Image (cartoon, helix red, strand yellow):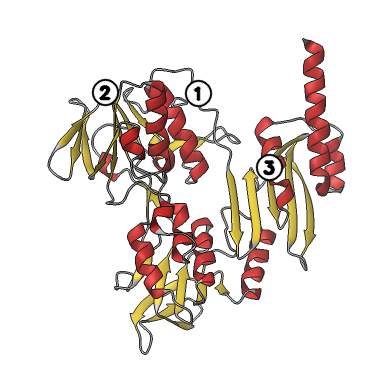
Amino acid sequence: MNHVIIGAGPAGVVAAETLRKLQPAASITLVGDEPEPPYSRMALPYFLINHIKEEGTHLRKQADHFAKQKIKVVHDRVLGLDRAAKLGLLASGSSIHYDKLLIATGSTPMAPPIPGIDLPGIFNCWTLADARNIATRAKPGAKVLLMGAGFIGCIILEALAQSGADLTVVEMADRMVPRMMNDIAGHLIKDWCEKEGVKVHTSTRVTAIRKGTPHAFAVDLSTGETVDADLIVSATGVRSNIKFLEGIGLETDQGILVNRHMQTNDPDIFAAGDVAQGRDFSTGEYSVQAIQPTATEHGQLAARNMAGLLGAVHRGSVNMNVLDTLGLISSSFGLWMGKAGGTSAELLNRERFKYMNLQFDGDILVGATSLGLTQHVGVLRGLIQTKTRLGKWKDKLLEDPTQIMEAYLASTQAVGFNAALMK
């Protein structure tokens, strides 16, 4: 069996290693379009502030790891597919044959339509090459402007602030991390950042970027203000890498459409990670979830099905985000925004930057948001993922959300006891 994996990120690497365990004699090729060994984008901020060296970003630390696993790593770009001949067409002019193919090409940053966005000195923090460029410019006292305060933007924010740079953040939405945090939590994160010396503009757009003096850029904002910058970092969203698949008959939407086996409409082609439009645990709908835990889960499931274990069914990824913003830990799970007809419980201490919001459907916890309350993170995810019925504990949580641990222990023990009685 000849397995080819396009994409050397977490989904691709986990898939290759899983295939090797399941099929020791198979041929496995991992194709990545960057010159470095497979690495984690989530590690780039730590590289920016010298917490790790470049090698620390690598997904596998031993230089000979893939050779020992008999996984061939090819540094090339796949420009297209010939599905009839089962070939990946490479930028080098050659091609690569597959029996089973996994597309794990991830996503690409989107450039906002802003005059001047193509000026030199403006970077995404998406590749090791980007990180090297940013690291040489984000020095103590340098004026840095970060466009975007979503999940990825806030990870970069942490590194830029710790570099000692004079940091300004511009976010179009009315709060920080708008796809992860509700209004209260998003504004608390903004207040925390400003307390830590970061200037944050929400409900604000960059309208133009011009060459400046004495600083490299003059950045015009929708508020009428102009901000000086020596470095601009853009974190304004990503899109799935599916353009190279145009015209070949694979079904796509926001990403590649897959079934519960991570299989496309071509039975020999699978997709995983940021490029796959997979099942959401909470809604049952199919969406792109561009987070690393989902990517690794997808990669393992896809590999099992590529190896012929079609009983490996994707039951849906739980929407899960955990973020450290200058020491303030925030998290959201499942339907954190709530469900129509559901009920909610809320606890807020603005002065201490502590917040919890629980969302229920009947007596089942379906979503949660927390800020500054790290001890409950695993419990919240567990209750949502198991769809545990809370019974009378739901009413207690409506009065006091901090009893979530007690509710978890009581409810899960009751489930275990009842299951034992049925044996």
Q: x and y percent of residue 87 in the render?
A: 20, 31
Q: x and y percent of residue 287 in the render?
A: 48, 39
**Of the numbered discs in the image, which one, if any, rests on residue 313?**
1
Residue located 44% across and 61% down the image: 47
The reply to whether residue 400 is in sight is: yes
**Which quadrant of the figure contains the N terminus?**
top left
The residue tagged 3 is 378
**Which quadrant of the figure contains the C terminus?**
top right
Earlier residue among tags 3 and 2? 2
Q: Are marks 1 and 3 in contact (CB under 8 Å)?
A: no
Instruction: Give the structural element (helix, strand or loop) at label 3.
Output: helix
Earlier residue among tags 1 and 3? 1
Q: Nearer the viewer, mark 1 or mark 3?
A: 3
Please state which amino acid type lies under the numbered disc 2: Asp
Identify the residue at the far top of this view.
423
Instruction: Give the structural element (helix, strand or loop) at label 1.
Output: loop
Dot 3, crowdedness within 10 Å: few (<14), some or many (≥20)? few
Does 355 appear above or below 217? Answer: above
The residue tagged 2 is 99
Identify the residue at the far bottom of this view.
214
| Quarter of image, res 366 | top right
Instruction: Give the structural element (helix, strand or loop) at label 2.
Output: loop
Q: Label 2 to label 1, Cα distance in Å?
A: 21 Å
Please state which amino acid type lies under the numbered disc 3: Gly
